[in-house]
Image (cartoon, rainbow, N blue to C red):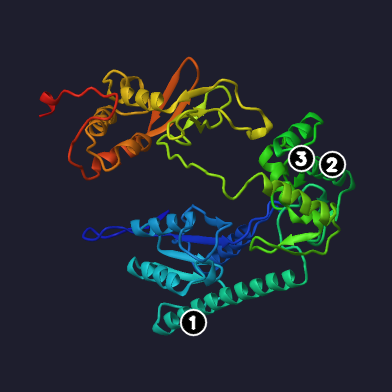
């Protein structure tokens, strides 16, 4: 960082240039990225036009894998922050569209440069200077960048429509039973995997449920599709089957020679089918028959839903409802370890009544000695947590029941211990919300009305 000497009456002025680069897509199979190429070209351009008194700022502002449609890019925001501090005097880009592909955003960036007396240098347009004509030309270039972006988007949409009309595949990873050729997008049948797919459909056709089929596949060591990502070069997949993944496989029209049309239907494909369309339709009808339209579904919005975890396996404990045999309107709600994620069965007998767990959390919040053991909270937050409990007890928040879930970040449950983690930010936000009129305390709380008055 070079600083020009100022006089006794004026402060020193900092002269340093920064280089900004951006690329829309990242490919990890190449060693030299587009950002690296842009940076080197801009660096050579800077050494040719700047004297030694104006050095490079020393920080690279690269946005790999970032679109130019908006300004929410990490490196660009960091560059604008440094410009606000007054530490950058020049910015160099390879092309104007590297800054933005939107005319309005480009004008906003150029206005920020103008306010802080930052000079913009464009390698592909070196003749532009800080004149009215240059400013006009910059706006024209920004308009062309936006026009080019819109034109590319229209061509992509037309290409997608054309591929759909011709029955061609669009994109995505190959499903089990198919491979992708080195060049091209059309699916090629993998004979070894195709035999497994036919067996899975055969089991479904005779009435096996997705969970039973997943257990069958896992016992034989069958795994999900293994494929190599073209962008990262890493091997992905190869995991045990779950019931949900089996259901997705059975629902995929690709195996019957079709492609999804993006609207919930299907269109003819150009690849070879693995399963006969008749068998595929029979399996769909069998799956649909297990979900009658008249089935009554209950959506119980519990305050700790998605936040209670099993200490044994680390998976989320989902709500479970047990209805009373004599009165269907009486329901007992529990949090239970029921997940089959990762192809593993749920933990046995890991369940806690929802009401008791909510009361335990409230008692923990009320106890002045309880939150003291929480290392993640500051002293102020511990005091605020007690205040939140008081507000919940007196129903002084708009929704006291769900306020429990808003301040709880995570609950780890086991048969022997319960660990509650609170969110410091949520506590502060709840305390800042408008208060309601206090009424009756929530069930399980003990409030001294005399002291409250």
Question: At 25% from the left edge and 30% from the top edge, which residue is drawn?
Answer: 393
Gap in Å between the C-alphas at discs 2 and 3?
13 Å
Q: Is residue 15 left or right of residue 453?
A: right
Q: Is residue 227 left or right of residue 243?
A: right
Where is residue 346 shown, x and y percent of the image? 61, 27
Q: Residue furthest top?
A: 416
**Foreground residue among 168 and 55:** 168
Gap in Å between the C-alphas at discs 1 and 2?
61 Å
Q: Which residue is mark 2?
A: 199
Quadrant in which the C terminus is drawn? top left
* Residue 229 appears in the picture as rendered: no
Where is residue 84 shown, x and y percent of the image? 35, 59
> Measured along the vertical axis of the image, is residue 181 above or below residue 364?
below
Q: Earlier in the sequence, mark 3 or mark 1?
A: 1
> Measured along the vertical axis of the image, is residue 170 above or below residue 294?
below
Where is residue 397 shown, x and y percent of the image? 25, 40
Of the two numbered discs 3 and 1 in the rendering, the one whose residue sits closer to the viewer = 3
Q: Which residue is mark 3?
A: 207
Assess whether mark 3 and mark 2 are in contact (beta carbons under 8 angstroms).
Answer: no
Quadrant assignment, res 423: top left
Q: Which residue is mark 1?
A: 140
Question: At 14% from the left edge and 26% from the top edge, which residue is drawn?
Answer: 449
Using a 10 Å C-alpha cutoff, classify the residue at mark 3 as few (fewer than 14 neighbours), some (14 to 19) or many (20 or more).
few
Q: Earlier in the sequence, mark 2 or mark 3?
A: 2
Q: Residue furthest bottom?
A: 133
Assess whether mark 1 and mark 3 are in contact (beta carbons under 8 angstroms).
Answer: no
Question: At 51% from the left edge and 79% from the top edge, which residue is drawn?
Answer: 141
Of the two numbered discs 1 and 2 in the rendering, the one whose residue sits closer to the viewer = 2
């Amino acid at each position: 960082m070079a600083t020009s000497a100022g006089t006794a009456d004026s402060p020193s002025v900092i002269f340093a240039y920064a280089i900004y680069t951006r690329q829309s897509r990242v490919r990890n199979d190449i060693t030299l990225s587009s950002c690296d190429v842009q940076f080197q070209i801009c660096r050579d351009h800077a050494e040719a036009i700047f004297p030694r008194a104006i050095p490079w700022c020393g920080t690279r502002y690269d946005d790999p894998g970032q679109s130019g449609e908006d300004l929410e890019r990490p490196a660009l925001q960091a560059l604008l922050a440094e410009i606000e501090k007054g530490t950058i005097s020049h910015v160099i880009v390879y092309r104007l569209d590297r800054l933005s592909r939107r005319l309005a955003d480009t004008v906003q960036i150029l206005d920020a440069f103008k306010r802080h007396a930052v000079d913009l240098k464009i390698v592909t347009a070196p003749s532009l200077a800080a004149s009215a004509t240059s400013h006009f030309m910059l706006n024209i270039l920004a308009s062309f960048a936006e026009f080019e972006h819109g034109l590319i988007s229209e061509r992509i949409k037309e290409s997608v429509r054309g591929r759909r009309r011709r029955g061609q595949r669009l994109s995505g990873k190959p499903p089990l039973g198919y491979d992708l050729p080195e060049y091209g997008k059309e699916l090629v049948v993998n004979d070894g995997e195709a035999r497994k797919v036919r067996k899975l459909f055969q089991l479904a056709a005779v009435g096996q449920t997705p969970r039973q089929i997943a257990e069958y596949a896992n016992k034989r060591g069958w795994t999900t599709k293994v494929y190599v990502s073209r962008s990262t070069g890493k091997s992905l997949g190869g995991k045990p089957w779950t019931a949900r993944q089996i259901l997705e496989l059975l629902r995929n029209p690709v195996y019957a020679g079709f492609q999804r049309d993006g609207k919930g239907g299907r269109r003819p494909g150009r690849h070879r089918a693995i399963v006969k369309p008749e068998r595929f339709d029979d399996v769909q009808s069998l799956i649909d028959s297990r979900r009658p339209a008249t089935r009554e579904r209950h959506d119980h919005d519990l305050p700790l839903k998605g936040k209670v975890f099993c200490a044994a396996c680390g998976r989320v404990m989902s709500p479970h409802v047990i209805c009373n045999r004599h009165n269907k309107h009486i329901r007992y709600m529990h949090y239970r370890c029921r997940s089959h994620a990762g192809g593993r069965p749920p933990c046995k007998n890991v369940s806690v009544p929802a009401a008791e767990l909510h009361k335990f959390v409230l008692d923990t919040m009320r106890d002045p000695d309880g939150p003291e053991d929480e290392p993640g909270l500051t002293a102020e937050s511990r005091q605020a947590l007690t205040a939140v409990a008081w507000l919940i007890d007196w129903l002084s928040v708009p929704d006291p029941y769900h306020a429990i879930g808003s301040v709880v970040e995570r609950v780890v449950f086991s048969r022997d211990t319960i660990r509650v983690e609170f969110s410091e930010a949520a506590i502060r936000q709840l305390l800042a919300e408008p208060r309601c009129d206090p009424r009756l305390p929530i069930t399980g709380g003990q409030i001294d009305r005399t002291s409250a008055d």
